[in-house]
Amino acid sequence: MSRPMTRPTNRLRVAIVAPTLEILGGHSVQADALLAGWRQDSEVEAWLVPINPLPPAWLTWAARRRYVRTLVTQLTYWPLLWRELRRADVVHAFSASYTSFLLAPLPAWLVARALGKPVLLNYHSGEAADHLRRSGVARTVLRRIGTTIVPSRFLVDVFAQFGLAAEAIPNVIDRERFPFRRRERLRPRLLSTRNFEANYNVACTLRAFARVQARHPDATLTVVGSGSEAPALRVLAAALGLRGVTFAGRVAPAEIARHYADADVYVQTPAVDNMPLSVLEAFASGVPVVSTDVGGVRAMLTDGVHGLLAPPDDDAAIADRVCRLLEEPGLGVRLADAARREIDAFVWDAVRDRWAAAYARLVRPAMAPVAAPEHS
């Protein structure tokens, strides 16, 4: 677990409750980006309180068992919350849907409430509508929490359907990690970086690639990710007779940029989504995007301007958009250049003051937002 350095006592102390990078996904990557942003900040001190803490050595054996692992994690997580939240001014808790909501942000809220600490809930999930419809516990907690932040206007609107207030602060991307390259002529080198879970529908990507390969026999597809559907996806690739498919597995954030650098077209086919960081990574890298038109994707990608959209679970339409990119001169460059300009809204300097103001309202509601530090 990361520990804060010694700081002046007048800095806002923020405990960020989120997964470590051992659990690769949007939450851990965004938490890491926020911690990096605050690391040299003169106004805010932030540290990670992991939702997946390492168990004591004497319980390590039990943590290897699938169902026992959850119990062991909770037995380690709750005492950690009591220790770490006690010294925070604000608790910034990341949240997903369904069981994850009950196991991670709910305990953080309960402990923070017992300690008298204000909570900012940072909710990331394209499945929010279904979760809120099903879970009275989630609706009750969200009504009582001080501030809810979501990464997209799409989720603001979803929350409003349930009478819940939320503020949008977009995801953060480190543009320096993803060098931009203009691809004047696109090669049929496709990339997917969504995890292998049902809501990301990577199977549709494989079916679409089969159609692309029928028109472009030298096409390749690199599939980065892991998850419960990995065996089924490998079976599907074999059944479709696909060539040139590389299952790259789990790739650390520090290594993901090279996959974008090697690709010429980014493809994702989720069934539900919010504000996928993968699309921003493709934007920053100069890789034109083809995506299903679901959730908050349309809020960040205008069809025909920053990328191409297709109906959900329509592999024929996805393949058609990919082939259009490959066969229409200049289209990929135009889309990639427009997408690159969108990245300015997602860098740390663009969102820093909004996060600082949200924290300040919780602990110093009568004061002005925290000012950005001066840069020498």
Image (spheres, rainbow, N blue to C red):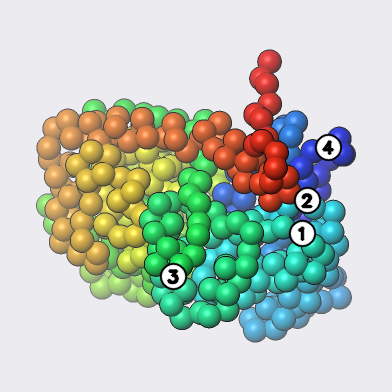
Quarter of the figure with residue 181: top left
Label 2 CA crowd tier, 10 Å (few <14, some 14–19, many 20+)? many
Quarter of the figure with residue 187: top left
* Pick the front one: 106 or 248: 106
The label shown at residue 55 is none
- Sequence order check, earlier mark of 1 and 3: 1
Q: Which residue is mark 4?
A: 10
Q: Which residue is mark 1?
A: 117
The answer to the question of whether label 2 and label 4 lie on touching residues, with beta carbons closer than 8 A, is no
Residue 317 shows in this picture? yes
- Sequence order check, earlier mark of 3 and 2: 2
The answer to the question of whether label 2 and label 1 lie on touching residues, with beta carbons closer than 8 A, is yes
Q: CA distance from mark 1 to mark 4?
A: 17 Å
Q: The disc labelled 1 sits on which kind of residue? A: Lys
Q: Which residue is mark 3?
A: 162
- Sequence order check, earlier mark of 3 and 4: 4
Residue located farthest toward the top when viewing the structure as drawn: 376
Question: Mark 3 or 2, which is nearer the eye?
Answer: 3
Q: CA distance from mark 2 to mark 1?
A: 6 Å
